[in-house]
Amino acid sequence: MKVALVTGGTRGIGAGISKELKEKGYHVIASYVSNVESAQKFEQDTGVQTIQFDVSNFEECETAYKKIIAELGKIDVLIHNAGVTADSTLSRMSQDQWHKVINTNLNSAFYLTQLVLEKMISQKYGRLIYISSVNALKGQRGQANYAATKSALIGFSKSIALEVASKGITSNVVAPGYIDTDMVRAVPEKILEKIIGTIPVGRLGTVDEIAHIVSFLADEKSSFITGSVISANGGMY
Ligand code: NDP
């Protein structure tokens, strides 16, 4: 059975990905950082195994990785989904806002990818999937920190794709537009209405629509797709 680690896999887009992969027959481990209550509920409702660690902390990533390997022996699929925002125009952005987003969204990709890659290379199989954002591709006022991390994931993924192309490992990015999750619901209603007005299909996307793409990329048969960025944004460019 293939093992998939979905970071931030207990809520929002990650929860949708975890459920879809479980339905497709993967052994899924969904990670979270602090929201124990929703993680426990998710585990009870879905039967998906959960694990608590902070992706922005290398030692915690390493401990979690070792725990998973001790229990399951391998990780075939890494879905790097955990991410945060800390919005502010650049002139007002604090050092904390900058570093929190860089550490959580980007440094975590380095930590986790480096950890999972060695075994993927030795087993000559792996799927790396990074969740970016439409705002990586078009920029967004108040999100210089967030957009920087999300576009960096694209360069990161494309580079890893080249490094491991001959090893049966693919590395790809999914760039969602605005999806109906807690992260987007936290946007003030008036601003959200304006955003929805700019989405050609006239609505927010659903977590299932993103999970579908991730599951497609994770499939063994998607072996010729690597270094790609797949957008799913309702026509918003
Ligand atoms: P949510 O805020 O709904 O969920 C975020 C998840 O990430 C939670 O499970 C959270 O854990 C986890 N997480 C946050 N920080 C850490 C951390 N330091 N270590 C481990 N886990 C952490 O996010 P969404 O589902 O909306 O977004 C998921 C991904 O998709 C993000 O990378 C986001 O940037 C991206 N995205 C989202 C879009 C949207 O419209 N929603 C659009 C484009 C991209 P806990 O439950 O413990 O808080």
Image (tube, rainbow, N blue to C red):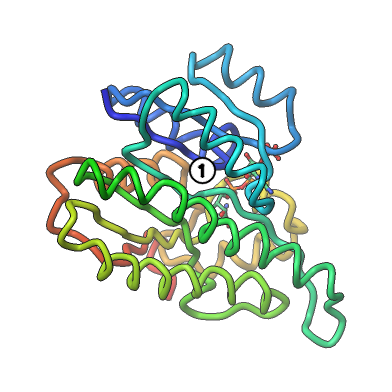
The one nearer the camera, 4 or 123, is: 123
Q: Amino acid at mark 1?
A: Ile
114 with respect to 216 (left or right): right
Q: Residue at x 14, y 51 (%)?
A: 223
Quick check: 95 above or below 224? below
Toward the bottom, the furthest residue is 91
The CB of the residue at mark 1 lies under 8 Å from ligand 1? yes
Q: Residue at x 37, y 36 (%)?
A: 75
Label 1 belongs to which residue? 13
Residue 135 percent across, percent down from the top left: 54, 72
Q: Residue at x 66, y 31 (%)?
A: 52
The one nearer the camera, 139 or 104, is: 104
Residue 177 percent across, percent down from the top left: 48, 61
The one nearer the camera, 79 or 121, is: 121
180 with respect to 226 (left or right): right
Where the C terminus falls, by quadrant?
Answer: bottom left
Residue 39 percent across, percent down from the top left: 65, 25
